[in-house]
Image: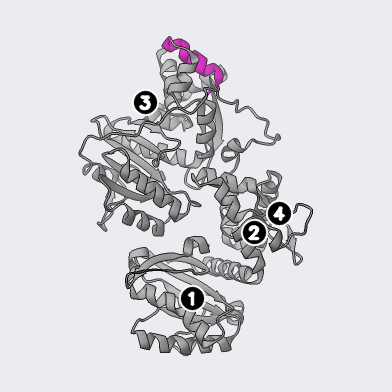
Amino acid sequence: MREIERDLLRLVAELPLADRIELARLSRWSERAVYQRLGGLERAGLVESVAHASESISPTRRYLLSEAGVKRLALSNGCRAKEILAEHPVSQPWQRTLLGRLDSVAVIYRLACALAELEGPPRLRWFRSQPADAALGLGDGRTLAVVRWGRTADRTAFGVRLSRLREGPSYSGALVLAPDEVRLRYARRRLRQAPFICFFSLEREAAWANSEQHVWHEPNAGVSLSLKEALSYVRSRGWWAIEPSPRGTQSPDSLDIARDARAPDWLLPARLKPAQKRTLDLVGDWPWIRPDHLSALLGVARRRVSKLTAKLERLDLLTAPRIDGKRRLVLTDRGLALLARRDRASVGAARKRWSAGLIEPEGPLEWRNLRGRRARQLLRNLTHTEAVHGFLAALADQGHANGWRVTQLDPPQRASRYFRFEDRLHSIQPDAFGMLRRDGREHPFFLEWERRAIRPSTMAAKLAPYLRYYGAKRPVEDHGAIPLVLVVFDDELAADHFLRVARERQERTDIRLPLWVSDRDAIARCGPLDCVWRSTDQVAPVSAIA
C-alpha cells in the first residue's frame, strides 16, 4: 500500500463522512490525488460512501471506513483493530451518531476547510455528549468549540448546552451556528459573559463562506467579521473536552443496503433528498397541514407535493389521515426521531409533545386519543390551526408573485418571546412569527388569528402582553427591527371593537404598538399583502407591509 493510501485511510478514520474535496483541503494531498486514490480504496472495499445533499450543501459523496478498512489501518499501524475502533470515531455507535447528524457534520467540515485556508489543516474532534458538536485545534495551540443550534431544538435545551459550554473546558474561542437571526441574537445574549470569545453566524452562510466573507458576529458588536478577522481576536492557548469512547467497539455497519430495502433509521439522512428534508421540516413545524397549504409554503406545484409526501409516507416518516374529508399531514414517531437526532434534541420529549400515535390503536383518530399533547391541542382546535396555515400559505403565494421573499416562518413554539418587564418575567405567545424580505430590507411580524377575544376584557387581556413587550424595548434587541403585530378576526365587527380597545389601552399606557387589524373575509378576498389592514390611526384599509 502506497503512502497516500495509508494516509487517506488514517484521514478517513479521523474525519468520517468528509467528502473528497474536504479530505483534500484537510490534508497535504491534491484534490486530483485524493479523487484517484479514494476511488481505488472504495473499489478495494476499504472505504464505503454515501450520497448526501441538504439545503446548505450541494450533492456529494461522503466516506467512511469499512470493517476491512479498519483492519487494514490497524495492520498499517501495527496495532489491533479494537484500538482503532477505540481511538477514532469509526465504531458502530460513532457511525450511527454522525450519520444521524449528517447535515450538521457536513457544515462543520466546510467550516474546517475555511479555517484550513488560514492556519493549515486543523485537528478536528467530534463529540457525542459534550455541549459542543466538535472542536477544532489550530497549529499554534488555540482551540475552537463549534456549537450548532438545530432547527427543532428548543430554547431551554439549547440554553442548557450554552451554560455547560461556559462552565466546561476553557477553549480559546467558540463558533456558534444558528438557523435564523432571532435565535442567533438569543445565543449572542446568552454568551456575552462567556470566559472565552465567541463568534456567531447563520448556518446557511457559514456553509458557503470562505475565510474572507463577512458572516461572523461578536456578542456585543454590530459589525460583521470574516473568519480571518475573527481569528485575530482569538489569542490564548486553549483546551478542549475529553470524553470517553462509547461503550463497545463494534465494527462499523455496512452501508451497502439495497435502495428498495427499508433503510435503517441511522441511514435516512443520507437517503433523503433536500426537498424531502425541507418537506419534513415544514410538516414538523405545522402539524395537520393540508397539502395545498404545504405546496404554497414549499413554493412548488401540488403534483410535486404529492410525489414528495408519497415517498415520505412509504418511509414511514409522515402520515396523511383524512379529517373532515381532507388529507392532513403530520410526522410519524419515526419522522420525529429523525429530526430530533439531527438537532441533538430529546427523542422522548419530541414524541411526548408531537406524537400523532394513538393511545388506543383500535380507537378513532380524534384529539382525545393522541399521545402528543401539542399535537392533541392543535387537532382539538383544527379550525384555528387551519386558519393560521391558510394565512401563511396565502402570504407565501402572494409574496412570491409580488417580489417578496419569505425568509422565516416560525410556529408558535418558536414564535414565543420571553422578557422582563417591571422586574417580572412575561411572555408573548403568538400563533406565528415571520420575516419577509424585499429590496434588502427585512420586515418581521407576529401573527394572531383571534377567535376568543370578543369582549372588551378579553381584548384588553390579549393586548396586555404586547404592550409590555414593546414597552420593555425588547423587539429591536430580539429582531433588529420593530416587528408588526398582525391580528386577524373572524368578522369585521370584532376587528372594529378591538381597534377601539387598542386605542384606549395605548393612550392609557403611553406605549405605541405597530398594530394592524383585519378580518377573515378581507384576507380571503384580497390576500395578506393587499390593502386589508387598519390601525388605531388608519381608518381606511391599507397595506401593512410596504
10 and 344: which is toward the camera: 344
Query: Badges 3 and 1: C-beta atoms under 8 Å apart?
Result: no
Q: Earlier in the sequence, mark 3 or mark 1?
A: 3
142 inside magenta stretch: no
Residue 332 appears left or right of 425: right
Using the numbered discs, state the Cα–Cα distance from disc 2 to disc 3 in whole angstroms. 44 Å
What residue is shown with label 2? 301
Q: Earlier in the sequence, mark 2 or mark 1?
A: 2
* Disc 1, SS: strand
Q: Label 1 amino acid?
A: Leu
Disc 4 to disc 3, C-alpha distance: 53 Å
Residue 323, compared with residue 508, is above or below; it is above
Answer with left or right where residue 239 lies relative to residue 388. left
Residue 113: quarter of image:
top left
If the image is split into quadrants, where does the C terminus sit? bottom left
Which mark lies nearer to you, 4 or 3? 4
Q: Residue at x 79, y 53 (%)?
A: 362
> For the residue marked with disc 4, what is the amino acid?
Ile
Q: Residue furthest right?
A: 362
Residue 322 at x, y = what percent?
A: 75, 61
Is residue 422 left or right of 332 when viewed as pictured?
left
* Range of residues picked out in magenta: 65-78
Residue for badge 4:
359
Q: Are marks 2 and 1 in contact (CB under 8 Å)?
A: no
- The residue labelled by disc 3 is 27
Residue at 25 percent of width and 45 percent of height: 195
Give the vertical position of 39 relative to 60 (above or below): above
Number of residues whose C-alpha sits closer than 10 Å to that of mark 4, classed few (under 14), some (14–19) or many (20 or more): some
Colour pattern of the rendering: one colour
Q: Residue at x 58, y 58 (%)?
A: 298
Residue 58, numbered label = none
Q: Looking at the rendered structure, which numbered label has been put on residue 486?
A: 1
